[in-house]
């Protein structure tokens, strides 16, 4: 699994007072999100503005520290890459040294402990046995520095607005060669320039564009540059945060087609954040619908779009413009009314109950679990309570 997120939470404290800083509450921007994404796949995250989509992206990328929860990249938990040395030492002690001692008690010999470990763990514990705790920590900290740099290379982002995400003082060529040299992916400047020119070609730009500055490009061309900058490092995961929202419809289609072709060429996974359901439908293998910090429905793209079950997802879909207006008449679903409630003061029970035409008494008291519709489709709504199987958040694995 390329990306596995378990029970991810991000709460922003609300501070009050100038002289004495007090926390008077929390904005629960992300509140217990689980998601899986594999290489070459796209996970579309949809929802209204302010529902927490972008915060998820930033938290996965570690531009924001999560309040709690785990993020695994290629099976490895990533939180300790970003800890302070002190917290890192605590983590390593618990994760490796205490674990080795527990195994020693059980197996009664260090040799047997080493035999029972996976390759990488064995390498670390062997080092601890041979060199003691202090040297073990030094060794691990160096390893963590390397892993953090790898993480920074392997997880990239493309922002909504390429005008503000590209450095206006750097030419496109400089923008592309800088990360290559920083991450030592090119031996020298000449090699970096050749890689950059090749990349410009792959995103549909010409070699002479390398000498131009961002303001000399159109919006679509700037977004091509942003995509080139993200993919030039050969990452495993790219977070695409509304990458087409600032573009004209015809340019949007070009960028989406470009992303699709680059995905198969570079074997990369996309987390595609958008409120544009048409684009999400076209590009995503898996889809999660968010409302006030939680996923209300998730599953395979075809399931979510062809068999939309959660009243909020239905309302979102119904609000999207249809190319064929006659289709609207076939739909029995409703349009969502009223405002999104404040994330500081979310409604009791199901957060959607004040806006939901199907709300029942239980919806005003309890928040629904995820009910399994089938292997590829889960929904958090009491209307589907008879589907008692459990969703990702209730799996034992990874919690
Ligand atoms: Fe509506 Fe109740 Fe389902 Fe919430 S749980 S979406 S209020 S029917």
Image: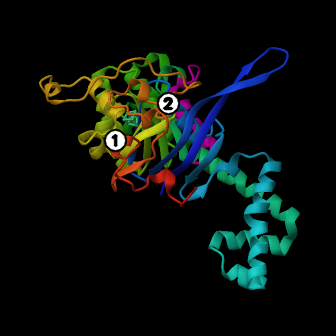
Image coords of residue 121 (percent x, y): 68, 69
Q: Residue at x 76, y 61 (%)?
A: 94
Task: Find out if the beta carbon at label 1 lies less than 8 Å from the nearest ligand 1 atom.
Answer: yes
Q: Is residue 4 above or below residue 327?
A: below
Among all residues in the image, which is located at the extreme top?
18
Image coords of residue 87 (percent x, y): 79, 49
User: Pointers 1 and 2 in contact (CB under 8 A)?
Assistant: no
Q: Residue at x 52, y 31 (%)?
A: 348
Is residue 290 visible to us here?
A: no
Which residue corresponds to mark 1?
Answer: 383
Q: Residue at x 63, y 73 (%)?
A: 119
Q: How is the image coloured?
A: rainbow
Quarter of the image for residue 107 reads bottom right
SS assignment at label 1: helix
Q: Nearer the viewer, residue 274 or 370?
A: 370
Image coords of residue 259 (percent x, y): 36, 39
Total labels: the figure holds 2
Q: CA distance from mark 1 to mark 2?
A: 19 Å
Q: Is residue 134 left or right of residue 292?
A: right
Figure quadrant, ligand 1: top left
Membership of 128 in magenta stretch? no
Magenta segment: 165-187
Q: Is residue 65 above or below residue 371?
A: above
Image coords of residue 326 (percent x, y): 11, 24
Locate the C terminus by quadrant: bottom right
Name the mark on residue 292. Answer: 2
Is residue 155 visible to us here?
A: yes
């Amino acid at each position: 699994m390329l990306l596995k997120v378990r029970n991810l939470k991000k709460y922003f404290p609300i501070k009050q007072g100038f002289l004495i800083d007090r926390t008077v509450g929390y904005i629960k921007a992300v509140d217990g999100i689980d998601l899986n994404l594999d290489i070459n796949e796209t996970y579309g995250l949809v929802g209204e503005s302010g529902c927490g989509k972008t915060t998820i992206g930033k938290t996965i990328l570690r531009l924001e520290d999560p309040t709690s929860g785990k993020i695994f990249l290629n099976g490895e938990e990533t939180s300790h890459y970003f800890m302070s040395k002190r917290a890192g030492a605590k983590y390593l002690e618990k994760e490796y040294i205490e674990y080795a001692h527990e195994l020693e008690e059980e197996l009664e010999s260090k040799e047997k402990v080493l035999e029972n470990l996976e390759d990488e763990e064995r390498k670390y514990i062997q080092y601890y046995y041979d060199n003691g705790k202090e040297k073990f920590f030094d060794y691990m900290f160096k390893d963590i520095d390397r892993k953090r740099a790898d993480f920074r290379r392997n997880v990239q982002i493309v922002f909504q607005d390429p005008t503000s995400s590209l450095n206006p003082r750097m030419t496109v060529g400089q923008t592309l060669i800088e990360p290559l040299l920083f991450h030592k992916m090119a031996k020298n400047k000449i090699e970096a320039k050749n890689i950059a020119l090749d990349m410009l070609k792959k995103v549909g730009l010409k070699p002479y564009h390398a000498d131009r500055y961002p303001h000399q490009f159109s919006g679509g061309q700037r977004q091509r540059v942003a995509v080139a900058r993200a993919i030039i490092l050969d990452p495993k995961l790219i977070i695409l945060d509304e990458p087409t929202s600032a573009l004209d419809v015809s340019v949007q289609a070009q960028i989406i087609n470009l992303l699709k072709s680059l995905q198969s060429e570079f074997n990369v996974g996309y987390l595609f954040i958008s409120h544009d359901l048409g684009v999400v439908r076209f590009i995503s293998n898996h889809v999660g619908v968010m409302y006030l910090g939680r996923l209300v429905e998730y599953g395979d793209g075809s399931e979510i779009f062809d068999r939309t079950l959660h009243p909020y997802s239905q309302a979102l879909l119904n609000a999207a413009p249809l190319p064929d207006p006659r289709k609207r008449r076939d739909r029995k679903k409703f349009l969502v009314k009223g405002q999104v409630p404040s994330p500081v003061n979310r409604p009791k029970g199901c957060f959607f109950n004040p806006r939901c035409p199907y709300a029942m008494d239980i919806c005003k008291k309890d928040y629904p679990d995820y009910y399994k519709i089938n292997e590829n489709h889960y929904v958090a709504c009491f209307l589907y309570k008879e589907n008692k199987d459990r969703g990702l958040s209730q799996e034992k694995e990874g919690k």
